[in-house]
Image (cartoon, grey):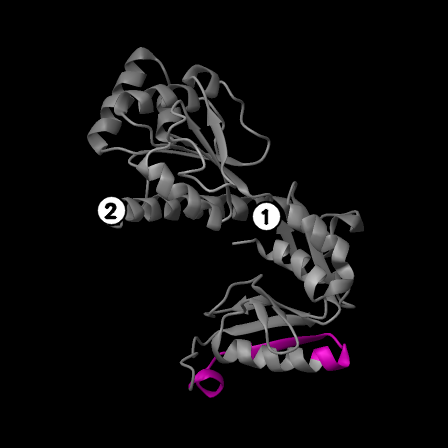
Amino acid sequence: MPHFYEQIRDELQREPGFVLGIISGVKGSSPQKLGAKALFFPGDRIVGTLGGGCLEAEIRLRARRALATREPATFEMTLDHDFGWDDGLICGGTVSGLILPKAAEAAEIWRVLASRDQPRTWGVRKNFSIGWVEDAGVHASACSEDWLYQETVLPPTNLWIAGSGHIAQAVAPLAQTLDFNVTIFDDRPELANFEYFPKTTHLRVGHWGELLAMPLPPQPTMGLIVTRGHQHDANVLAEWIHNPFQFLGMIGSRRKSRIIREGFIKRKVATVEQLDKLASPVGLDINAATVPEIAVSILAQYIQKRAEYSNSASSKKA
């Protein structure tokens, strides 16, 4: 599924007459989080979502007016019994946001954000114009009073997967729908090919010695070790444990992980501190049994870790 900024870029070519709705503030419980976005078109077509139900229906009504008047607006709604009882939307929180009928005028900004080749921070000023926060010449926090909304867009997180068997084949397509940039490493061309992986997957096929010598890209990268056997997993781990992965996981039982860990420490392949950062068995404990379920458990953990990194990066920037 294309990222939202890719969708904006594509819609600019097809039907640029849209209203951009943004959730710019949330207090308490709500059906959507800060930063949720949707494009509203004539004829009631919607791209993205602001939470569905009566909340989205109300914003859609306001977007219709904005399409007619071309006037931007803010909104604030309390999701209580009076507002959302009929739709079951009684979260109790307060949601505020922006309705921007002239968002298409920032076409160049959307095109840059769609590429996501580097971190960029954009925002909506108090006059409802859209611009780069970096252009203000100061950190976002230093000029927050000048902005109604700010957002830092990061490049997609890379996911390096060692192995091209059943688990990798289940993880890779799902990971790409979840906005990971996936690369498969294996020495088996009969498996590491586009018969088993989406065309958008990067394939690195060759001798393991060459594959494991590849340096990490500058963008944040996570690693997943799911090769065809314990020894291959250990060989990959012996190299990848020294790389600055944002997060590194390896499939296997607790017994397997303990044996590899003890062997690495004994042979001084890796330090205790390095091994403590390894997630093995990888994946959240959801009692997964089938290959698709295992893939879901793995990616749930990677989504969790990616969010932790993003939140940490945003707080440091502020």
Neighbour tally class for label 2: few under 14, some 14-19, many 20 plus, Cα within 10 Å: few
Kindly identify the residue that appears in the image at 26 percent across and 33 percent down: 252
Neighbour tally class for label 1: few under 14, some 14-19, many 20 plus, Cα within 10 Å: some
Q: CA distance from mark 2 to mark 1?
A: 36 Å
Number of marks in picture: 2
Q: Are marks 2 and 1 in contact (CB under 8 Å)?
A: no
Does residue 252 appear left or right of residue 45 in this picture? left
Does residue 315 appear left or right of residue 162 in this picture? right
Nearest to N terminus: mark 2 or mark 1 = 2
* Magenta-colored stretch includes residue 81: yes
Q: Quadrant of residue 231?
A: top left
Q: Which residues are magenta?
A: 66-85
Q: The residue under label 2 is which amino acid type?
A: Thr
**Foreground pick, 108 / 257:** 108
| Residue wearing tag 1 | 314
Image x and y of residue 176, in percent: 48, 46
**Foreground pick, 167 / 132:** 167
Q: Is residue 107 visible?
A: yes
Kindly identify the residue that appears in the image at 42 percent across and 86 percent down: 86
Secondary element type, mark 1: helix
**Foreground pick, 9 / 37:** 9
Kindly identify the residue that appears in the image at 51 percent across and 48 percent down: 179
Q: Quadrant of residue 305?
A: top left
Secondary element type, mark 2: loop
In the rendered view, would you say 25 is above or below 303?
below
Q: The residue under label 1 is which amino acid type?
A: Ser
Image x and y of residue 97, in percent: 62, 70
Q: Nearer the viewer, mark 2 or mark 1?
A: 2
In the rendered view, would you say 307 is above or below 90?
above
Q: Residue furthest top?
A: 267
Image x and y of residue 19, in percent: 68, 71
**Foreground pick, 115 / 240:** 115
